[in-house]
Image (cartoon, grey):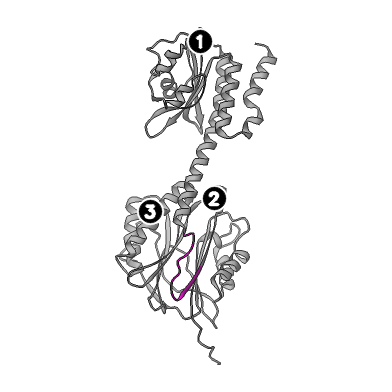
Amino acid sequence: MSDDERLRRLEAVTDATLSRLEVSDMLDELLDRVRDLLNADTAAILTLDDLSRELVATAARGLEEEVRQGVRIPLGEGFAGRIAKSRQPLLLPTVTPDDVVNPILIEKGIRSLLGVPVFAGGDVTGVLHVGTLTPRQFTTDDVGLLQLAADRAGMAGQIRSRKVEQDAALALQRSLLPATLPTLPGLTMAARYVPGHEFGVGGDWYDVFALPSGWVGVVIGDVSGHGLASAVVMGRVRSALRAYSLITDDPGEALTLLDRKVGHFEAGSLTTALYAMISPDRTTLTVSSAGHLLPVLAVPNRPATLLDVPVDAPLGVGRLTGRRRTTAAAFPPGAVLLCYTDGLVERRDEIIDVGIKALVGVVEPDDPESVCGAVMSRVGLHQPTDDIAILAVRRDGEPSPAVAG
């Protein structure tokens, strides 16, 4: 093969225009180019289903029946299965029924096959193969070209997997974060959630719910990490806390139960949570913190301050002896409780106390929407490096007149 021909082949499978196509279109175009460059009659990509450990026909040219029929090849069996298991190219100058488990290849009259593994991040994620209707002796150049195309397909597969995971994580988080906060007598609320990374979803959450006893639960929490895995854990933790809130009106006891659940079922996930409850008459807060940052309480005619609450260990770390603690505090008319996650106040170049002090200086006993807006514009970063969740709850009613002193 001449140098010019090699260059043409390389350019055909590394062409930058392929990257501008949607993943499915890009795979179809790649198969068309491979079939043309190798003078093959068929080309197909099979992807590895990790749960079933089977290869599934994903895209094909000349073997469209594979995709339409949803052909599945067990790992280690047949032509494609052997390639995926061995992680090595495979050439079959003469195809026999003993070589393949997919009857479509025999029915189609395939006489010769060449296949290579598709990699993504060092793992085999599929197989790319081409076939001819006449006997063919594939060369090492053919193998190299097909492997180059497989690497391109692997990149596309990673993009598609990332997109699928991102869509699933976003859908999950949207279903868990309240689209609108509940309307409850005596309370006004507002919240914000801002993703702090390109994936756009993580383990931060907030929640507000009314309980049969008349108390109102207010929750903010943070599961470490980003992406679908953190969002899934967050969803399970959120649901479990809601269930425990129906058992007890003591936030510390509810977090104690949640601690056991996280420690047993979510081992390895660092989770913090703040659970506050507002009494039916709205006069009292009871609060428990599982490793979470203290909320800000802004009371009319007084400077805002951090709520004086002991901070127990995060959930599931196994360091707690005895029950988690609950602290009661007054919640006067006009007061605002602001809960937040650490992405709001953490900076890489300063200690967290600086950010917390700045936050306390911004929170006022005002309309919660105005409070959230002021906090995000004056404390939050324009390009946060971590997720940010904030939740502001105000007790309605006229504040008591200031006492002259």
The amino acid type found where label 1 is placed reads Leu
Label 3: how many Cα within 10 Å (few below 14, some 14–19, many 20+)? some
The quarter of the image holding the N terminus is: top right
Q: Quick one: SS at disc 3?
A: helix
Residue 2 in the image: above or below residue 117: above
Q: CA distance from mark 3 to mark 1?
A: 54 Å
Q: CA distance from mark 1 to mark 2?
A: 48 Å
The amino acid type found where label 2 is placed reads Gly
Q: CA distance from mark 2 to mark 3?
A: 19 Å
Q: Do the residues under discs 3 and 1 have CB atoms within 8 angstroms?
A: no
Q: Nearer the viewer, residue 307 or 151?
A: 151
Task: Return the residue at label 2.
Answer: 200
Label 2: how many Cα within 10 Å (few below 14, some 14–19, many 20+)? some
Task: Return the residue at label 3.
Answer: 236
Residue 60 on image: x %, y %: 51, 23
| Rendered residue at 34%/65% (across/down) | 245
Q: Do the residues under discs 1 and 2 have CB atoms within 8 angstroms?
A: no
Image quadrant where residue 57 sits: top left
Task: Return the residue at label 1.
Answer: 133
Residue 76 placement, left or right of 122 = left
Residue 254 in the image: above or below residue 45: below
Residue 382 on image: x %, y %: 63, 58
Q: First in sequence: mark 3 or mark 1? A: 1
